């Protein structure tokens, strides 16, 4: 069986399957075999972690496909694009992905800009690299401000993960309730505070601050089974207000189409949430 390298940073980009979904996948593979190949980059597994885990456990054969990328950042962007196209992500997972994408793009641009400067062609760099936040805001249909705020969140999650993978996993899987605003604040916190938060989360000792939660006095009257959807809806409304206002400001520049994009994105999110309620 081909040796596979597991990269923890890449692995944690993938949402954890719930027990029922994992068992269904396992039963399918046991009956029909692993029909989809695992995707590798320099021997590192970048797609198919659950399939690999099942095949490895049951000693089942699998096939692999090797892909070529110039850097880890390009791999990360590929994984993010894959996950966003495949899954219904929670708000914090989506913010994390957008933020990581932004940071990876900036790092790639920084390397290319350094090459351009060393080769004496600095004048052409702006033509090749439009502002990252603007480019990604158009791709994800949110405001540039949201993209930059997502980058702060991703920075904090990465810092927490450097202290404790378990804490990072709990944040992204929703096992711990820590607000996105709180995570953004932590992007500028000291190493000591990051370490303290990571330790609390890992040991299940973290307690929400009032600003961490989107709950209200009326929340106690809402059935507990509905709370995740209500919280998600509340956060969606807040983010929509920011993006909608940004689109309205741009109307004066003849970009009314952007308003329709924001509205359509919001409608699609509402429809998806409606189906899951």
Image: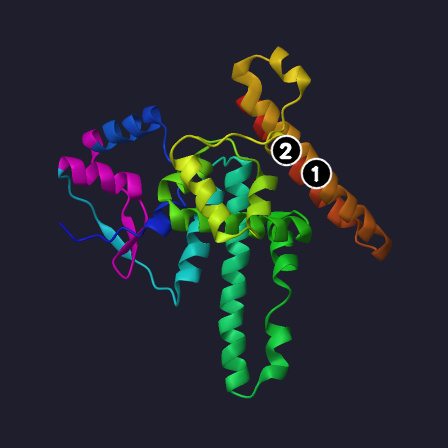
Above or below, 121 against 251 in this view is: below
Locate residue 223: give its quadrant.
top right
- Residue extent of the magenta highlight: 30-58
Which residue is depicted at the point 24% across and 53% down?
5
Location of residue 117 in the rendering, given as x and y in whole percent from the top left corner: 55, 83
The 10 Å Cα crowd at callout 1, few under 14, some 14 to 19, many 20 or more, is some
Q: Is residue 33 magenta?
A: yes
What is the C-alpha distance between the residues marked 1 and 2? Answer: 19 Å
- Of mark 1 and mark 2, the one earlier in the sequence is 2
Q: Viewer-proximal residue, 251 or 246?
A: 246
Front residue of 261 and 159: 159
- The residue at the point 70 percent across, 43 percent down is 262
Q: Is residue 51 above or below residue 39?
A: above
Give SS at disc 2. Answer: helix
- What residue is at 37 percent from the left and 44 percent from the top? 164
The one nearer the camera, 82 or 232, is: 232
In the displayed structure, 251 sits above or below 18; it is below
* Mark drawn on residue 127: none
> Circle 1 sits on which residue?
240
* Residue topped by disc 2: 211
Residue lying farthest front? 192
**Residue 56 magenta-highlighted:** yes
Instruction: From the viewer's perspective, tell me whether residue 152 is left or right of residue 27.
Output: right
Give the structural element (helix, strand or loop) at label 1: helix
Q: Quadrant of the C terminus?
A: top right
Q: On the rendered structure, is 240 left or right of 95?
A: right
């Amino acid at each position: 069986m081909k040796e596979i390298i597991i990269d923890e940073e890449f692995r944690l980009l993938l949402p954890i399957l719930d027990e029922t979904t994992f068992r269904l996948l396992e039963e399918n593979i046991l009956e029909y075999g692993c029909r989809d190949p695992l995707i590798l980059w320099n021997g590192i597994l970048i797609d198919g972690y659950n399939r690999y885990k099942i095949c490895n456990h049951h000693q089942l054969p699998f096939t692999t496909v090797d892909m070529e990328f110039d850097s880890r950042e390009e791999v990360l962007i590929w994984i993010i694009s894959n996950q966003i196209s495949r899954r219904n992500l929670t708000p914090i997972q989506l913010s994390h992905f957008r933020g990581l994408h932004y940071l990876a793009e900036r790092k790639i641009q920084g390397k290319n800009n350094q090459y351009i400067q060393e080769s004496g062609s600095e004048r052409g760099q702006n033509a090749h690299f439009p502002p990252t936040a603007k480019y990604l805001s158009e791709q994800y249909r949110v405001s540039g401000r949201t993209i930059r705020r997502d980058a702060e969140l991703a920075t904090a999650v990465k810092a927490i993960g450097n202290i404790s993978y378990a804490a990072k996993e709990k944040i992204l899987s929703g096992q711990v309730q820590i607000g996105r605003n709180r995570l953004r604040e932590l992007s500028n916190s000291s190493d000591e505070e990051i370490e303290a938060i990571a330790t609390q989360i890992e040991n299940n000792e973290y307690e929400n601050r009032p600003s961490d939660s989107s709950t209200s006095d009326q929340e106690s009257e809402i059935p507990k089974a509905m709370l995740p959807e209500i919280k998600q809806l509340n956060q969606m409304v807040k983010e929509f207000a920011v993006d909608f206002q940004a689109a309205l400001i741009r109307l004066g520049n003849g970009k009314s189409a952007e308003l329709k994009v924001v509205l359509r994105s919001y409608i699609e999110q509402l429809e998806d949430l409606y189906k899951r309620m």
